[in-house]
Amino acid sequence: MSEAADLEAYFDPPVWPAELGALHGIIGLGRRAQTDGVCLWLSLRANRMGGAACPLLPIELTLEGHTVYAWVEETAFTEWLEPGFPIPGIAALTAQLQCAACAWTLAPWFNWCAQHELSAPSLKAFGETAAQPETVSEPVSILLTLASEHTETGPRRLDLRLTGFPYAWLHAFACSMSAHPEPRAQTRQIDVMASAGFARLAVRQLAGLRAGDVVFAAVQAPLSEGRVFCKIGALFFQARRIDPNHFEVERIMTDLDEEPGMASDTAQCIPEPAVGDLPVTLVFEIGRMTTPLSKLADLQTGDVLETTFETAPDVGIRAQGKLIASAKLVRVGERLGAQITQMMRLEPQPQQDADLSKPEEQSVEQPIEDDALKPEGTDHGNESA
């Protein structure tokens, strides 16, 4: 998984188990500790590897009478050991030297635990290369990163994936550290989608869209006032453009599906004949702004974002994150709409055996809208932020 996807997953995590959700609330973008010349960073990562897992080396530990593991990637571990253990690979070390290398590597972590009256893990054994266990291949990983900045060979880092650790112990360990975004979160720039509004169509209507059709917004941004909606994952806010490179956060909004007039497009237990009536949220994307991840993670009303805002030549219509059409913004009275210029794809496809054989008849030259949609904004003009 790329570093970019790893960090962006902070805003679009999987369905967290209750214990991990509580731990995520403590850890946030990272917890930091400094000891013995080494920085310790604790973080939660949402994995998106689609089940593919690379071999890791298991370091077997004992904690409070239980066996737990810290998994490392062999090449990264070998690089971490330099220059103290300049070796071509772990296999070049005897079993005794492998354990010594592990003990030396984990000593700062163990010492921190002892200094803060936490039960410190103890080294039990160093195993052979193995496929990741199920707990490592799950959507969420608990990551402890060792970082050493002041070395002759430059910055070094080693990621340890922790498995089997009691959540109560992890909670106490996290609380012993200070809240501080880990290095990649501080430097990573995230593209935030800026939109002119949102619409809702049923699956059968979405499947019938053609070039020339107009989709009206259920919730529309006051574009003529320099305001746009911004969204990434579950983060949803309205911002006002101050100048070309600065936006002020005016309000943090509820999740899109909870906004007035909008309906959730998450999976629900709906009878098969009603699939065609399942609502899908459409986003009118007008551009993207680049913002530091650490800033977004602690976003507050009134914050000013220094960002590069790039508008697209055409409006993009997205459904469930996928670009399905290009369009141009149009006005019909006080209503904002997107007139489709080109269809990219027709998704979601009707499900097999679903009763979608009689789509609603609408002329491609007439606006297509859901009667239940009501305009939410009354801004005039057709200016973009």
Image: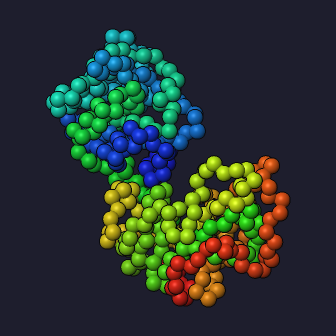
Q: How is the image coloured?
A: rainbow
Q: Position of residue 23 (x, y in %)?
A: 35, 41
Where residue 66 sits, quadrant-wise, is top left
- 22 in relation to 199, above or below: above
> What is the x, y in percent for residue 3?
46, 46
Q: Tell me, yes or no, if residue 264 can be seen here.
A: yes
Write the residue at 45% across / 53% down. 11
Q: Is residue 36 above or below residue 308?
A: above
Pick the front one: 359 or 197? 359
Residue 77 makes an appearance in the image: no
Question: Residue 53 at what x, y percent from top left?
Answer: 54, 31
Residue placed at 37% from the left, 73% from the top? 250
- Within the image, what quadrant is residue 251 found in? bottom left
Q: Position of residue 367 (x, y in %)?
A: 72, 79
Residue lying furthest right: 357
Q: Toward the viewer: 61 or 165?
A: 165
Q: At 80% across and 77% down in the image, what residue appears? A: 363
Q: Is residue 242 left or right of residue 133?
A: left
- The answer to whether 371 appears left or right of 361 in the picture is left
Q: Is residue 61 left or right of residue 261?
A: left
Q: Is residue 10 above or below residue 240?
A: above
Would you place residue 125 above or below residue 340 in this image?
A: above
Residue at left offset 17%, top offset 32%: 116
Question: Image quadrant of residue 300?
Answer: bottom left
Numbered circles on residues, count: 0
